[in-house]
Amino acid sequence: MYNMEEKDLKISIAHLYPKLLNLYGDMGNIITLKKRCEWRGIKVEIEEIGVGDNIKEHDLYFIGGGQDKQQVDVAEELYKNKDFLQDERDKGAVFLGICGGYQLFGHYYQPFDADKLNGISLMDAYTVAGKKRFIGNVTVETDFLSPKTLVGFENHSGLTYLQGDTKPLGKIVVGNGNNGTDKSEGARYKNVFGTYLHGSLLPKNPHFADYLIELALEKRYGEKIALSKLDDSIEYMTHTSLTGKAY
Ligand code: GLN
């Protein structure tokens, strides 16, 4: 077992294109990861990646959601870094993509009335724009978190379909999720996670935030490192108040 104190640990995070993809406060996910590390004395380096920037090696990569228009600019940038980001995935780096960012983790996103956007194929999935916009609260049941639930809200017209070894993040309990028909929400392949849950997601799902931080620490230090417990009473009060809540 690792014999370093949490105060000796560090993780580096790349925040991908926050000036373009940061819909509905998705930046709250970065703030949550940062604070939950700092509250434990773990150092966090956060690098904002803008259009034209080189993407360097990090332990965790985060990308938020956005309108179709912003996705066009980001898709082009991400595609330039596709090989590097796939290598990072294969080295165990952690990725979290929300909605529009999640859609670009797949092979492509076909907007309603625009050219198909190439994704970076971090996961075996694709997205096509639907006629209906899914807006509302979402509750998901996972098989890898405790508590099992994730809560948030969705606002997307994209319909995402998973293939091959890419599995859902969980099963829809309330809401529409990936496509409103197969009861799946989000996706996971290796340490790449995508979800339609805005909110932002991590402040009211602290167990998922810590799960991602532990994966990022394992990638950096090559060993499983269990995080110390925090007082998450307020976070779980919020989580419980939203669990099962419809519109
Ligand atoms: N433009 C995409 C859609 O409508 C993603 C939206 C978002 O990120 N909330 O499906």
Image (cartoon, helix red, strand yellow):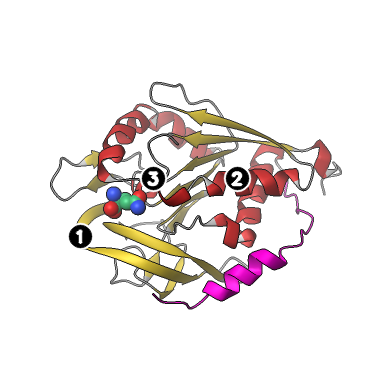
Instruction: Please state which of residues 39 and 122 is positioned toward the viewer in this rendering.
Output: 39
Instruction: Please state which of residues 190 and 226 is positioned toward the viewer in this rendering.
Output: 226
Q: Amino acid at mark 1?
A: Gly
Crowdedness of circle 3 by 10 Å Cα count: few (<14), some, many (20+)?
many
In the picture of the structure, the residue carrying the numbered disc 2 is 31
* Foreground label between 1 and 2: 2
Residue 106 point in image, percent of width and height: 34, 47
Is residue 235 within the magenta segment?
yes
The answer to whether mark 3 is within 8 Å of ligand 1 is yes
In the picture of the structure, the residue carrying the numbered disc 3 is 101
Residue at image location 31% in from the left, 71% down from the top: 182
> Is 88 positioned to the left or the right of 11 in the image?
left
Instruction: Please state which of residues 99 and 85 is positioned toward the viewer in this rendering.
Output: 99
> Is 219 positioned to the left or the right of 149 in the image?
right
Secondary structure at numbered mark 1: strand
- Residue 130 is tagged as 1
Q: Which of the two labelled residues, at mark 1 and mark 2, occupies the earlier sequence position?
A: 2
